[in-house]
Image (cartoon, rainbow, N blue to C red):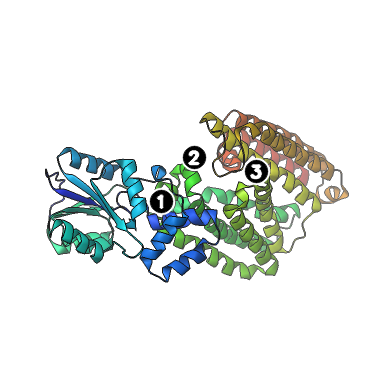
Amino acid sequence: MTVTEELPTGRMLVVDLDGTLIRSDMLYETFWSAFASDWTVPFSAAASLLKGRAALKQKMSDLAKVDVTALPYDDAVIDRIRRWREGGGRTVLVTASNQDIAQEIAAHLGLFDEVHGSDNTRNLKGRHKAAFLTERFGDGGFDYMGDSPADLAVWQHAGRAIAVNASAQTRDRLRAMGGDAEFMQTRDTGPGPYFKALRPHQWLKNLLIFLPMLMAHDLSLITVSKSLMAFVVFCMIASGVYVLNDLLDLASDRAHPRKRNRPLASGNMPLSHGTLLAPLLLLHGMLSAIILGPSFIVVMLVYLVTTTAYSLFLKRQLVVDIFTLALLYAVRILAGGGATGIPLSIWLLAFSIFFFFSLAAVKRQAELVDGAANGKITAHGRGYRGDDLPLVANMALGSGYVSVLVMVLYLNTGMVQKLYPSPSWLWGICLVLLYWISRTVMLTHRGQMHDDPVVFAVKDRGSQFCFLLVLGFATAGALL
């Protein structure tokens, strides 16, 4: 069995779509595209599936609006097809995906002489695809480029098998069949994309869970243990939400200069795996939350419902999206209080709402600045226009300043006098926050902000220095 590339003149190259020409699957693409616009789509999908997989593909194709120009095409496969045509060969796109979508993709690429896909009754996959190709081109009258175990039935009748990113098991079964075969590996199949999809850098936000414990100066073993457990559970559920959000945000992520490199949007992680991973993380996280009691479970349910509503609807609502993002930050503090049973100060909640509203507004400001730099007059998938930028920046700055004012008022309460031996040191925190908020909004205005201000703060030297100053002032107030 050979593994060298061959470009025979005049022969037919048949190319599969899902997992081969594109690093994705059009059934999942259409499902998540439709679901992002209409929350009732899963029910429609279930009803269509009762009529068969072909009917499901047709239904999802009718409901979805997929931009075929933004799909994660495999450049190595496209280059191979071009060289095949330059060598005098003919090319055919034959896919189990819907015929209409296959036609759109073929028209966009301009690389195929024929296009054949599934319709409302026929699912052109596996043995059905093999029978179709054998009848049309003859047994051994075509070379076939595919990727999945279902393609083994086609490779049996192909003159030459070209396996693209096939699993080790599929490669072994193909070798066992004998005959002429080639193996192409065009992407990383390691765990890296899966770990990246969990967004571990976002777990930094979950450190807010420890804030009630620290503000109450309660460092007992049981309190610390409950806070740690709450942190782990929240990370698990948050990662499930991030995966779900990435599935629903495929179109907008691919239109973004940096988010298009996310594992699901780029095709480095199969959509089918993301579709399975999200509910597994959420279910396991919610079951683990039971250990921490009913208050913590209620907070996690609020978080889950709010994030789902945000992904499906609220993120497209003007200003409401910023309020929702601020709430999702604050929920982490509520989770810490719920897990440990520590009552939350009204001052802490008031500061959190204004401060996190400022961070959420900065996030939107950064998106609008990026859009303006790329000549976009609207933010993709959001409710803002380019000329809203000054107002969003004012919201970020104004809310941030109010959060500092809340802290100033808090420092004059009797509660602070009881908790801190030297509360005058805490005034330094107010000055640092005033500087950091002003600088952050200014850098965002200049287009120097990351998509997430929390990630920016972790990587930015100025923000790191501000954090050390805050920690120093807080320590001095508590110990001196």
Callout 3 crowding tier (Cα within 10 Å): few <14, some 14–19, many ≥20: many
> Looking at numbered disc 3 in the image, what kind of residue is underneath it?
Ala
| Horizontal side, residue 408 vs residue 211: left or right | right
Q: Are marks 3 and 1 in contact (CB under 8 Å)?
A: no
Q: Which residue is mark 3?
A: 360
Mark toward the start of the polypeptide (2 vs 1): 1
> Looking at numbered disc 1 in the image, what kind of residue is underneath it?
Gly
4 w.r.t. 126: above or below: above
Q: Residue 409 appears in which quarter of the rendering? A: top right
Q: Name the element at disc 3.
A: helix
Which image quadrant: the C terminus? Answer: top right
Q: Which residue is mark 2?
A: 256
Mark toward the start of the polypeptide (3 vs 2): 2
Where residue 68 appears, x then y in whole percent? Answer: 39, 45
The one of 332 and 30 positioned closer to us in this rendering: 30
| Horizontal side, residue 11 vs residue 430: left or right | left
Looking at the image, how many numbered discs can be counted on the residues? 3
The one of 344 and 319 positioned closer to us in this rendering: 319
Q: Which residue is mark 1?
A: 192
Mark 3 or 2, which is nearer the eye? 2
| Horizontal side, residue 377 vs residue 56: left or right | right
Mark 3 or 1, which is nearer the eye? 3
- Would residue 474 be seen by someone viewing this image from the given angle? yes
| Horizontal side, residue 470 vs residue 271: left or right | right
